[in-house]
Every structure is written in C-alpha cells, then in structure tokens.
Image (cartoon, rainbow, N blue to C red):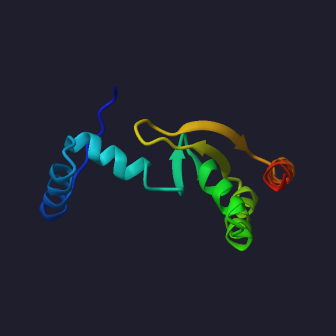
Amino acid sequence: MKQVPLRLEDSMHNEISDSAARTNSSLQQHIVQLIFNRGDIYRTNLDGRIQLRVNLTYLGDLLVLGRISSFNGVYAMMEEALHHKEQVIIEKHYTNALPQHMKTFEMVKDLEKWRDAMNNDKSK
C-alpha cells in the first residue's frame, strides 16, 4: 500500500474524523470511501493524462429507469472529454472494494459502438 500525504484544515479534519466515528470505520477507510464510492462520475489525472471515470452501474440504471436524457447528458460529457484528448474509463463500483476498471476509450467511434451495444442490451 502506498501512503499519500494529505493536509487538511483542522475543521475539515475534525468533520471527517467525526463522520468516520459515526460510521464505525477507520479514518483511512472512511476517506477512501469518500473518494471512491460516492462518485459515479469523476476525473483523475494519472500519468499526466486526464481521465473521465464513469460508473457502469450508474449508466445502466439510467437506461433501465428510462432516464434517457440523463444518460445522453453523461454520454455528451464522455464525448467532450475524448474531443479534449482525455481518456474515458468505464468502471464498476463496489461497496467494499475499489472500483474495477472495465474499459478505456480514446476515440469517439469506439465510444459510439459501446453506447449502441449498451442501448441494444438494455432494450431487450
């Protein structure tokens, strides 16, 4: 495991520590959960490359629940990221583990094929 220095103002540290205590989790576990488990869409900068990361379950839920305009909005964000030379990464999120990498996109045409396949799967 790698350590990362994290500097917080005292008030923020107290708030996060109190929140961790209320959930009966360690401070480290609570911070990891805050970073990874609450974001269905977030950006990272790894190895000098901006990445837009999207939770696959969130996208699937939008389609299943008929929230097509919301799905299209997220898809537009993904397309825009690719136009700006960012990567788009689809992840599967879990309650008790870090996100699992599912697929990486670097070209819009590959993203379009994936979207079409996903829409076809959800319409069956």
Residue 106 position within the rendered picture, expressed as x and y whole percent measured from the top left: 75, 46
Residue beneath the point at 83% across and 56% down: 123
Q: Which residue is more in the foreground, 67 or 45?
A: 67
Quarter that holds the N terminus:
top left
Instruction: Tell me the quarter of the picture where residue 11 sits.
Output: bottom left
Direction from residue 76 to residue 119 in the image, left or right? right
Residue beneath the point at 69% across and 41% down: 104
Residue beneath the point at 72% across and 61% down: 63
Instruction: Tell me the quarter of the picture where residue 29 sits.
Output: top left
Which residue in the rendered view is the most extreme toward the front? 124
Q: Which residue is more in the foreground, 82 or 63?
A: 63
Q: Which residue is more in the foreground, 63 or 18?
A: 63
Residue 55 position within the rendered picture, expressed as x and y whole percent measured from the top left: 59, 50
Residue 107 position within the rendered picture, expressed as x and y whole percent measured from the top left: 80, 49
Residue beneath the point at 72% across and 67% down: 66
Above or below 105: residue 72: below
